[in-house]
Image (cartoon, rainbow, N blue to C red):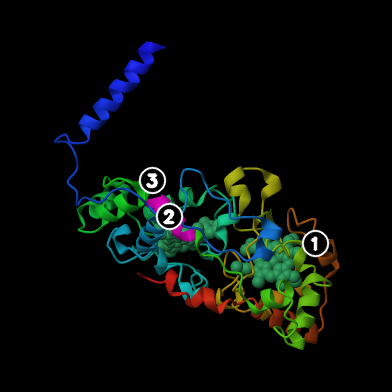
Amino acid sequence: MRKLIVLAAMSVLIAVAGSCSKEDPPKNEAVYNPTAASITIPAFVKQYIGEMPMPSDNPLTTEGIFLGRKLFYEKMLSNDMTMSCASCHKQENGFDDPRPFSQGTNGSFGDRNAMAIINLAWDKHFFWDGRRSSLEGQAHDPVTNPIEMANNWPDVVQRLQASGEYPELFFKALGTRKIDSNLVVKAIAQFERTLVSFNSRFDKYYYMGDSSALNEQEKRGLSIFTGKGLCKNCHLMNTLLTDLEFRNNGLDENPKDAGLMKFTGIAADNGKFKVPTLRNIAVTAPYMHDSRFATLEEVVAFYSSQVKQNSPNLDEHMPEFKSGLNLTIQEKADLVAFLKSLTDKDFITNPAFSQP
Ligand code: HEC
Ligand code: HEC
């Protein structure tokens, strides 16, 4: 026991002596001391889906979010320095790509529509086929994808390391000036978690009780969405407007793209795709994984009478779709009007999300 006390006393002495040794950093050098950040989430959202989940090894900080935002708009990530994440994920389009198929730096096109980046902090599976299970993991892929940024990580890291400003920004955000790919994706994921959208007219009406926020036609459309149209069976009224599952909504009798099966190899997953959020849907055209529909009118016409009954693994939530919903012309127009009320103007114009 006495030994321990002596040892403790000695280490205090050493610590005191150490504090005036020559190894001390100069006084003007920055200390790693990031500012913990939290995103304000409306109370009604927390009631349905709880606080924003946060990985313990990548908590939000003001410095981390700023670095991630800068990297999201950083063209050094692509091989020829012409493309950033934002080239295909545009804020005014709900961080989606208005082009049916995104074009990579080498000119070739992908075969899937880009996806909106909205409220993904609550999600667990990413891409149309769910092949990535974290935002950090997801962000690795576009950089090296030959039909996207077509780059390699050593080159990206070397460029960022050689730039005047990035090493200092990484130090402030993540505690080291030595950049690597894991730190890059951590910062980008922090920025992506801040992309929350819960402030449409629909939210004001449905969750916040402002009865004048929707007009009569939009209210009728909402009733179809939650009633006869069965939309809410998969695009849940849980504030996310998705159940975060993978389902086949009956687009094809013989799906060209196997969707979830591409990732799992299981036949029962053939034709299943991620149920996307419908938030900001009016600005994220074209629609479906292969951009087959240019307008919401086409989408609604599909659900009304074009669901393919022989589609493999057609979703159990869609038995009624088998005979066709057969919405009237008026009902279809009402439903489309409702979908357009899901746009959150603050989200698509928020200066905190734009190019820094
Ligand atoms: C060339 C266009 C392009 C670029 C550049 C691009 N993406 Fe994407 N992004 C897509 C496409 C296309 C998909 C869907 C691909 C699929 O499902 O196979 C997608 C999917 C995603 C998803 C999945 C969303 C969800 O709901 O599952 C996220 C997140 C994402 N991208 C973030 C990023 C980030 C971060 C970057 C930059 C590091 C980036 N993207 C660069 C086209 C692009
Ligand atoms: C069985 C579950 C299910 C039901 C019910 C359902 N959807 Fe969907 N919805 C999906 C899936 C899965 C996708 C993505 C399909 C794909 O791209 O292959 C989707 C895609 C969409 C899209 C395109 C989203 C985008 O980002 O491209 C819209 C719009 C849409 N649904 C609206 C509706 C409406 C309106 C209804 C009710 C009439 C409805 N959905 C009913 C599962 C469902």
Is residue 325 a member of the stretch shown in magenta? no
Mark 3: give few (<14), some (14-19) or many (20+) Cα within 10 Å: few
* Residue drawn at x 27%, y 62% as measured from the top left: 80
SS assignment at label 3: helix
- Front residue of 65/324: it is 65
* Residue drawn at x 73%, y 61% as measured from the top left: 234
Question: Which SS type dominates the magenta stretch?
Answer: helix
Instruction: Give above or below for 58 relative to 73.
Output: above
**Residue 5 percent location from the top left of the image:** 37, 17
Q: Quadrant of residue 240?
A: bottom right
Instruction: Give above or below for 166 relative to 340.
Output: above
- The answer to whether residue 41 is left or right of residue 322 is left
- The answer to whether residue 70 is left or right of residue 351 is left
Residue occupied by mark 3: 182
Residue occupied by mark 1: 318
The Cα–Cα distance between marks 2 and 3, rounded to whole angstroms, is: 16 Å
Instruction: Give above or below for 275 relative to 221.
Output: above
Mark 2: amino acid: Thr
The Cα–Cα distance between marks 1 and 2, rounded to whole angstroms, is: 43 Å
The earlier-in-sequence mark between 2 and 3 is 2
Write the start and end of the magenta stretch as one range: 184-192
Q: Nearer the viewer, mark 2 or mark 3?
A: 2
The earlier-in-sequence mark between 1 and 2 is 2
- The answer to whether residue 276 is left or right of residue 24 is right
**Disc 3: residue Cβ within 8 A of ligand 1's nearest atom:** no
- The answer to whether residue 239 is left or right of residue 140 is right
Instruction: Give above or below for 38 relative to 87.
Output: above
Location of the C terminus by quadrant is: bottom left
**Residue 76 percent location from the top left of the image:** 29, 60
